[in-house]
Amino acid sequence: MAYPAGGTDNILLITDSYKVTHHYQYPPNTTVVCSYFESRGGKFPSTVFFGLQYIIKRFLEGPVVTKEKIEEARDLYNAHFGHEYFNEEGWNYILENHDGKLPMRIKAVPEGSVVPYKNVLFTVENTDPKCFWLTNYFETLLVQTWYPMTVATNSRSQKEVIAKYLDETADSMDGLGFKLHDFGFRGSTSVESAGIGGTAHLVNFCGSDTITAITTAKRFYGCDMAGFSIPAAEHSTITTWGRDGEKEAFINMLTQFPNGPMACVSDSYDIWNACENVWGKELKDMIITRGQNGGVLVVRPDSGDPAEVVIKVLNILGNAFKTTENSKGYKMLPPYLRVIQGDGISYESLGEILEAMKSNGWSADNIVFGSGGALLQRMDRDTQKCAYKCSYAVIGGKEVNVYKNPITDVGKKSKKGRLTLEYENGKYTTVEEGKGNPTLDALVTVFENGKLLKDYTFAEVRENAELELRMQSGAL
Ligand SMILES: O=C1OCCC/C1=C\Nc1ccccc1
């Protein structure tokens, strides 16, 4: 099934220019090239593997090589190089002998798996000896899994931080799934990347304002509704009432959304006044009554030093609405009142805020976070050092273990030979040079000769990525 494309979906053009000249550069009689993808290390010790399925479904599945695409590519590359380097014969061979389907095999660790770095995450090889040049032609596209993987990893690391504080200061972990909301659509580089990164976040959480993540998760992971949101104000819907009209704006929010959760940004002018005098006095009874109909007011600061502002807002609201003590001995606001902090949230700042709340006696259950740029954008391929390298070839019928080992960077040393990822007693081990035990190999053949062989559901992906702590706590 072809998936609606954006940009060019001529996969002959979705590569780096130099790769168009690489079929001239391998040794004569090369018949197999096998490459692998890994995270060599980086910010987080383990990586959530996610997003290969999107690339396979969007670009690789089915008869992706056509006469028209070959001609388009030929003309473009001839103009691009000013010379006929394009492997027209090679692509025509695929069209004629494989009905335009890619004679390639991809074996990957299941989506959502959390794998310590320096382990093989997927391998790619050609399945037709004449198409040895195909394996690394697709490096460019396949390495783009770095993005959904890194978003999912960073997002999951924040889930671990929040889970720790819920475990220490909250009655349960029940609210964990909604504790980090995706605010990142506008700060993403494109609608497509917002969809990819937003879906990666939803592997770990269920709250998002990035609508293209909902559609991406549905289209590529079969999830009907991967994320949820609630009515919320933005500054314009408060400030259009005028500085003197902030109370009226707040009353309007309470009455337009009489029950369920509703978030109201309250820092347009003076957050302290808004919390102490408007929410805490003038509208206090309305909020309590609304609470009796199941309404929850989520007060939203949106400026200042996050930890400092959150503590001050909690203290002001706590004084106005009275707090209770939960089973862990930490303060809770009444059930109809919560706080959301959506400014300056990142893996680094989250811990600071939650630690400040804890040391001020506040349960992590009182707050929800929103994150934008740090969640979907503030990362690159180097954050988890994602790389694709050739490890094995067959040349003139002889097997060759291929590797690089630069004297200028031992960290860039690559793995040799046929690789397997063995999973035993909760531990991953990459076995090189074909010495692995195939029955222990965690790599699954997900793509072969144009067919997607394993279609992970989003539920499977989420389960694979679930936290240990959460599983232990039986919150599943
Ligand atoms: O501020 C924002 O920036 C951009 C993304 C959306 C957004 C806020 N949304 C929201 C959702 C649920 C509760 C509170 C706020």
Image (cartoon, rainbow, N blue to C red):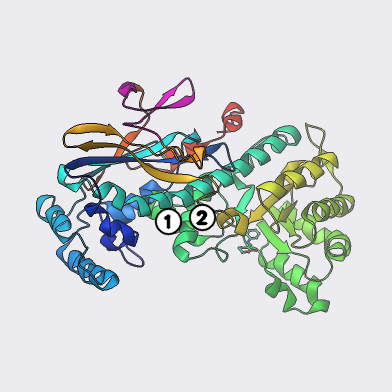
Q: Which mark is residue 61?
A: none
Q: Quadrant of the N terminus?
A: bottom left
Give the image location of residue 117, x and y in percent: 50, 36
Q: Is residue 210 left or right of residue 97?
A: right
The magenta segment: 415-439
- Asked if the residue under mark 1 is in contact with the one under mark 2, i.e. CB atoms within 8 Å, the reply is yes
Mark 2: amino acid: Gly
Q: Which image quadrant for residue 269?
A: bottom right
Question: In the image, is residue 417 above or below residue 376?
Answer: above
Quarter of the picture for ligand 1?
A: bottom right
- Is tag 2's residue or tag 1's residue first in the polypeptide sequence? 2
- Residue 67 in the figure: left or right of residue 372: left
For badge 1, the amino acid type reads Thr
**Residue under label 2:** 198
User: Residue 216 bears which disc, if any?
Assistant: 1
Residue 430 on the magenta span: yes
Please say whether residue 176 is one of the residues in the magenta stretch.
Answer: no
